[in-house]
Image (tube, rainbow, N blue to C red):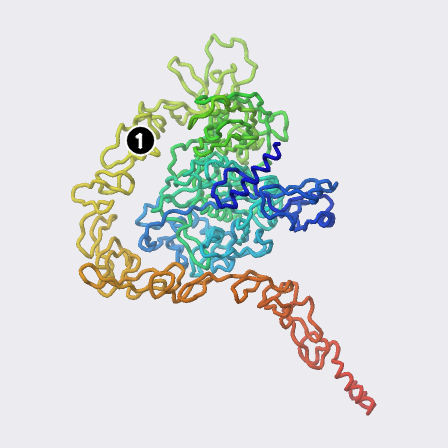
Amino acid sequence: MIRNAAWRRSLLCVLVLSLGFASPPCKARIYTNHWAVRIAGGTEVAERIAEKYGYRNMGQIGDLKDHYHFYHSRTIKRSTLYSRGRHNFISMEPKVEWIQQQVVKRRIKRDYKPSPPLSLSSSAQLSQAQSNIFYNDAKWSSMWYIHCSDDVHNCQSDMNIMGAWKRGYTGKDVVVTILDDGIERNHPDLLQNYDPQASFDVNGNDMDPMPRYDATNENKHGTRCAGEVAAAANNSHCIVGIAYNARIGGVRMLDGDVTDMVEAKSLSLQPQHIDIYSASWGPDDDGKTVDGPASLARQAFENGIRMGRKGRGSIFVWASGNGGRSRDHCSCDGYTNSIYTISISSTAESGRKPWYLEECSSTLTTTYSSGENYDRKIITTDLRHRCTDSHTGTSASAPMAAAIIALALEANPLLSWRDVQHIIVKTSRAGHLSAPDWKSNAAGYNVSHLYGFGLMDAEAMVKEAERWRQVPAQHVCVESADRQIRTIRPEHVVRSVYKATGCTDNPNHHVIYLEHVVVRITITHPRRGDLSINLTSPSGTKSQLLANRLFDHSMEGFKNWEFMTTHCWGEKAAGDWVLEIYDSPSQLRSQKVPGKLKEWSLVLYGTSVHPYSSLRNDKPRSTDTLTLTPTEEEFTEEYNGPCDAECNDGCEGPGPHHCINCLNYFLKFKNNTRTCVSECPSGFFHDDRKRCKKCSSSCETCIGSRSDQCTTCRAGHHLNEGTHTCVASCADSFYLDYDFNICRKCPENCKKCNSSNVCTECNPGMSLQGNRCQLTCDPGTYYNGHRRTCEHCHRTCATCAGTGAEACTKCAEGYLMEDWRCVLTCSTGYYLSEQTSDNGHMQKSCKMCDHSCYECLGPGERNCSSCVSGYNLEAGACVVSTICKDGQYRSQQGLCHLCDVTCLQCSGPEEEACTRCPDTRFFDDGHCSIRCQTGHYPMGRQCYLCHHSCQECVDEGPDNCTSCDRGILEYISVLLNINPFLIVVLVS
C-alpha cells in the first residue's frame, strides 16, 4: 500500500508538471537516465558490465577513481519514478560496489534581477584616477572597487589590489576556473588568458565551454564572473581583471540538468592543473531549502583537498547566497557550510549590508558588490564581446575573492588550502563595514555573521604569503555524541553543555587551537523554520548556527546536518561548549507533537601546536595578569584537582574564582571577590590589563568608561554617530537608522531627513531640490557640494546638475541631448528623434535604439539598420543567429548539425567538407586524415602535393622524392631497351 501511494503521488506530480503549474503540490524527485557506478577492476571491466546491461559507459567521473558515468538510452530522460527493468540487475554484479540513478538538483546562480537601475552615466560620477597606475581599458576609471579615486562618492576603503600589483603580483601562472553556465572564451578581454586545459562542457560532454546563446542572454553569468578574475589589461577593450595575468578556464555545468555526477565532474576537473575553482551558485535561496553536496560531490571536495595541487589542496571559493529578502540562512547550504570552501560575503561600497545578504557563522571573508539600486555595481565582461556595469549579488563577490587568492598564490605557490584560509583570517579587516554584531573572539580576531573576518586586503595577503611558513598538520577531533533526547517546547530554550577535551588522549587527533568547528545535529520538529540555534565556545564566543526562517514550513527537521562556524578561530578547544536551541512559533501549530533534540556532537578541526611559528612554544597569553588570592576560609590544604577552563598557570580550587591567573579577563565584584571570565559581560569593557570595567550607564557595550565611548546602547537609547554617545532621540540634522539603532548624520545642508540621501527640510539659505538641499544657482551654473559654490556648466550644457558634458539637463544651442549628455551628432546605438513641444517648438534629441539593434533609424525592434554580433538583420529586425560549436556547422535553416567525426570544423556533413582538423589529424584537400595520402607530404598539420615526378616525397621539389611516379619509371625502362648506354648517363 505504501509503495502504491508513492506511485500515485508521483503520477500526480507528473500530471501537474505536464499541465504547467508553477508550484506542484508535491516535492517530487526527477530521475534522469544517467547513473553513477563504482566498479573495481578498471575501464575494461566497466565497459564489459555496461555493455552486458545495455548501458553506455561515458567515461570516468572527473578525477574520481573507479567511478563511471553510465547512460541508458532506453530509459525515460526525466521521470518522477525511479527506473525499473532488467538493467537494474547490474547491482548484483560482484564488481559493482555502488550504483546510483542520478537525480536533478535545483541549483541557482547567485546574481539577482533588480528593478531597472537609475539612469546614471558612469562618466558623470567619476573623475580621473589619481593613482600612478593607469590602464587604457574603456571602463578602468569606473572600477571603484579597485581604486579609490572618486570625488563624488565618499570612497572610504578599497581592497588594496593596486598595492599587490605594485609589488609585482598579477596572478601569473595561477589557474582559475569558473564553474557556471560556460564562458565566452573568444571575448576580447578573455581570449589572451583563456586556458583550454582548465575548461570543459559537462552539459554537452565536450571540451568547449562556450555558453548557449539565446535572445535573453540567460547564460551570461559565467562570462561575467570570469572577467572579474582575469580580464586582460591594457587592451583598450573593457575592464582590468584583478588577476589580469592569471589563466582563466570555464566549466559549463549549469545549463542543463544538474546532478550529483555533474557537480563531481566539475569540482574534480584537472585538479593538478587548476589552482582555484570559483562557484557563484548553490541550492535555492528561498528561505526554506536545506540542501548540500551529495556523495560524489563530497568525495570530489575531499579528493581535491587531499590530492589537488600536488597535495597542497585545491582552493574552492563559494558565494554565500542571496536569500536575505527570503530570510534565508546560509548555514542551510551545505556548500558554503563546508570547511573545504571559502565562503564569501558581500558589502556595498558604503560598507552597508546589501539587502540580499545572508548571515551565518560559516562565512570567512567579504568583497565588494552592490547594495541598493542606486549603489554602484560591478563592471565586467558580458556576452557577445560586450561589457556590463550591472553585475551584482554574492555572485560578483566570489570571483573577486578567487582573483585576490590568485595574487597570493603567485606570491607563494606552496600555500596549502589551509594556509590560504589562515592568511585570509589574519589579513581581513572590519574597516568601514557596518554590522551590529562585530565582536572580538578570544584569539583577538574581529568577526561578524554578516562579513566573517571582514573585507579582503590583497596587499596584506601577498605580504603575508611572501613570508608564510606552512601551518602544522590538521587534526580532527570527533567528540562523543550526546544522545540524551530533549524535548523542544514552544517559547522555551533547550540548553545542552558538552565538556570537550579536544581528544587529549589521542596525539594524532588532539586539537588545542581551533580552526573550524562543526556541530552535527539531529532534530525532529513540526515546523523547522521556527528554530534558531546558538553555540557558545569555552572562551565565550557565541555563534548563531541557525536563525528563524519565515518560509520554512518543513516538518523534516535536521537529520545529522552539519552546521559550521569559523568564529572560534584561534581559540582553545577544551572546555564547556554550550548548545542552545530556541523554538519561536511564528504561527499556530499543533502542540501535540513537540520538537525533539535527538543527538548532537562536535567535530573540532585545528592543530595541537600554535599554527604560527613564532608562537608555537604555546606561551601564556600574558604575564601582566593580576593574581587572584583566595579567601583564608577556602582550601587551607593544597588543591590538586582540575582547574576551570578560564584559568591560566594553575589554580587553588575548581572554580573560575580560584584561578591564579586568568586566561582571558577578570571581573571584580562589590564584595571585593574576583572571577575569571571568557568575555566581559554586557555593560563592561576590558582594559589593557585584562580587567572588566563598567561602561557609562546608558551604554550596552563600550570601549571605555566615558559616556562618549559607547559602541551600542541600552534599550530605549540610540547611538549617536560621531559623538559615540547614547541619546533618547535623534537631534536635528540626524536620522535614526533602524537596522543598527544609530543616529546618523543627515546629508549636508539638511535640517531634517529620513535617510542618508533624502532631505525633508533644509538649513536657512538652502532650498529643497528633489531630495537634496542646494543653493539656488543661476542658469548655466550648478552647485558644487565640495567647494560649496555655484560653478559653470560644461560648454555643451544650457543647464546642468554637475560637472562634465554628461551632467547636462538641457543642451546648449546646436547640441542634442543623449542620455544626460549633449552631443553634436547621435552616437552609434542612438537615432535622431524630433518632437513638437506644447508651445509648438521642435525639440531634437538622441534616443536609444532597441536593445536588439546595433544601429537604427527609429524606435522599436523593426527599425534596426545593423545588428550586434550574434544577430542577423531580417526585415529591419535583429534576430538571434545560431553560433555553432566546434564539430558543428550551420545549415541554411540556421540550425547546427554535426560535422563528420574526422572534422574539428566544417562547412557541411560530408567527409570532404572539413575546414579545420583536430591536432591528431592532417588537413588534406578537405579531408582530415591520420596520414597524408600518396603523392602528398605533411608540413604543419597540413598535406601538400609532391613534385609531379614523385610517387612519395618528404618535401617539395624533384630532389625530395622517396619513390618515383610509375609513369616516369616506365618511360625510363623504354629508353633503356632502346639504348643500354643510357644507364651510364642516368647513373652519372
Q: Please state the horizontal and vertical placement of residue 247, each as a whole percent of the image.
A: 53, 54
Name the residue located 49 percent from the left edge and 35 percent from the top edge. 331
Secondary structure beneath label 1: strand
Q: How many marks?
A: 1
Quadrant hosting residue 868: bottom left
Foreground of the two, 146 or 205: 205
Q: Please state the horizontal and vertical placement of residue 644, each as a whole percent of the image.
A: 51, 19
Quick check: 152 above or below 970? above
> In the displayed structure, does residue 448 sit left or right of residue 638?
left
Q: Please state the horizontal and vertical placement of residue 694, each as a whole percent of the image.
A: 35, 22
Q: Please state the horizontal and vertical placement of residue 218, each as a whole percent of the image.
A: 47, 52
Foreground of the two, 624 or 524: 524
Foreground of the two, 920 or 582: 582
Amino acid tagged 1: Leu
Q: Quadrant of the C terminus?
A: bottom right
Quadrant hosting residue 502: top right
Q: Is residue 418 visible?
A: no
